[in-house]
Amino acid sequence: MKLSDNIKRLRKEKAISQDVLANHLGVSFQAVSKWETGAAMPDVLLIPAIASFFGVSTDELFGFNVYEIEQEVQRICDEAYTYRRVGDIVQAEIILREGLKRFPGNEVLLINLLYVLDEETQGEELAMLCKQLANNSHDDEIKYDAIRILAEHYKASGQTELIKPTLEQIPEIYFSKLQLTALLLDGDEAFHAAHLELGVTLERLAEMMSVIGEHELASGQTDAAKATFARAVNVLEIMDINLENEAWKRIYTRLQDALNEI
């Protein structure tokens, strides 16, 4: 079924006029009329908002087989990640954008795209996509990850006054699903969850020790900062992190550089 047919069907099921849908999306009713007749397509950036308004996924909006699309989207993301992991961000971006041509507005592809956009040259697009996902996604993992990335963008772009109100949209969580899965289940499922949670916890530990060390250094506690950075480096070395992974390499290099500069 065409996108045009689905928009028209969903609008009628919701018993609303083209004007109501148009006002919600910030477009003219003529635009909605053209979508429903197939004379024009909605802007790709409006797709998640349209899907959210009707309470369906973007794949359902296009009439795709959800299971088959999920499998293909995962394959695309995995392929992009193989390039991102070795630092080939350009190729990873190409793969994800090609995927979005096939599956416009797919939230999984969009959140992965955020990880390869360049802050300096693509900051405007990055912020726009973050806000789009934060406002329209029904998937908490995607929603809050987008908010986190948006807060990081505000810091990188010097918009520090926007960081705190952005972070306040993220609820405080004292345990994770991975943590509880590892602790409460058994066998391979618990082992896999524990392995993933360990990686997340180790990354957070290294980042927090880096923040503490930087604060100690800035406040004149040179010896304390040196000890903090050294402990962080030792922890990562003991855990035998994979330095071919760009994220781990970046964290380890930052800590090592901070230690060497003292």
Image (cartoon, helix red, strand yellow):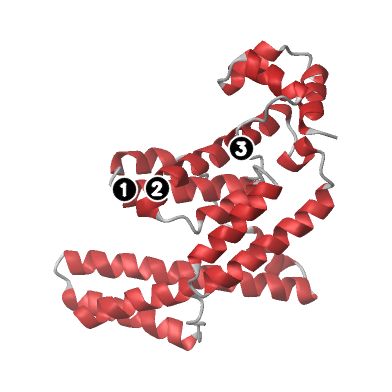
N-terminal of the pair, mark 2 or mark 3, is 3
**Does 28 appear above or below 72?**
above
For the point 57% across and 59% down, which residue is it?
A: 94
Mark 2, other Cα within 10 Å: few <14 / some 14–19 / many ≥20: some
Report the residue marked by disc 3: 44
The amino acid sitting under disc 1 is Ser
In the rendered image, which quarter is residue 180 located in?
A: bottom right
Query: How far apart in space, not on screen, are marks 3 and 1 (Cα)?
Result: 26 Å
Mark 1, other Cα within 10 Å: few <14 / some 14–19 / many ≥20: few
Query: How far apart in space, not on screen, are marks 1 and 2 (Cα)?
Result: 8 Å
Report the residue marked by disc 2: 123
The amino acid sitting under disc 3 is Val
**Does 198 appear above or below 181?**
below
- Viewer-side residue, 33 vs 45: 33
In the rendered image, which quarter is residue 68 located in?
A: bottom right
Query: How far apart in space, not on screen, are marks 2 and 3 (Cα)?
Result: 18 Å
